[in-house]
């Protein structure tokens, strides 16, 4: 039985699931931020801030989903960028907590650390062909 024929280990399946959940979460939070901006400043639909936030959020969400897809297909190269992207969520969560949004900051940190741990797990490394 080759590496591609064996079922995905639970660690890798959960990590991929978390990446996809984060992709959706990034888009939802960005949408809420843009909604708040537009509610406060109604005439700014195509101004710089809302457009920049949505473009950046879309790129991050696409990266998370794309890396999740590649990990699902057992592409070992996707693990490094996925771990790096997850590490960017740690300061994000920290600052959310500092700004008083701890109900969002704590889960952001917890999910990022969980995903990194799962991607570095021996079973995930073996499934991706990484020593």
Image (cartoon, rainbow, N blue to C red):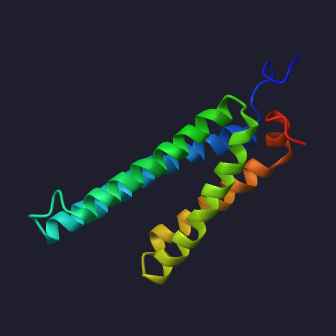
Q: Quadrant of residue 126?
A: top right
Residue 50 higher or lower than 76, as above or below: below
Q: Quadrant of residue 38?
A: bottom left
Q: Residue at x 14, y 63 (%)?
A: 44
Q: Residue at x 81, y 49 (%)?
A: 121
Q: In the depicted view, which residue is nearer to us: 53 or 3?
A: 53
Residue 58 higher or lower than 93, as above or below: above
Left or right: 25 as drawn, with respect to 80: left
Q: Residue at x 74, y 43 (%)?
A: 11
- Quadrant housing the N terminus: top right
Q: In the depicted view, which residue is nearer to us: 41 or 20?
A: 41
The percent position of residue 4, horizontal first and vertical second, equals 78, 22
The percent position of residue 117, horizontal first and vertical second, equals 75, 55
Residue 113 higher or lower than 61, as above or below: below
The percent position of residue 19, horizontal first and vertical second, equals 57, 46
Q: In the depicted view, which residue is nearer to us: 37 or 53?
A: 53
Q: Residue furthest front?
A: 48
Q: Residue at x 76, y 25 (%)?
A: 7
Q: Residue furthest left?
A: 43
Left or right: 20 as drawn, with respect to 50: right
- Quadrant housing the C terminus: top right
Left or right: 6 as drawn, with respect to 56: right
Query: Disc count in the image?
Result: 0
Residue 115 higher or lower than 16, as above or below: below
The percent position of residue 127, horizontal first and vertical second, equals 81, 34
Q: Quadrant of residue 90?
A: bottom right
């Amino acid at each position: 039985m080759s590496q591609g024929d064996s079922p995905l280990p639970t660690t890798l399946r959960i990590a991929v699931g978390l990446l996809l959940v984060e992709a959706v979460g990034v888009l939802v939070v960005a949408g809420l931020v843009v909604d708040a901006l537009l509610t406060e400043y109604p005439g700014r639909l195509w101004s710089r801030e809302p457009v920049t936030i949505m473009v950046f959020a879309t790129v991050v969400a696409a990266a998370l989903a794309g890396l999740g897809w590649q990990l699902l297909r057992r592409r070992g190269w996707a693990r490094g960028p996925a771990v790096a992207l997850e590490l960017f969520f740690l300061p994000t969560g920290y600052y959310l907590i500092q700004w008083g949004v701890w109900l969002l900051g704590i889960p952001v940190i917890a999910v990022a650390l969980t995903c990194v741990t799962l991607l570095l797990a021996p079973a995930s490394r073996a499934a991706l062909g990484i020593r």
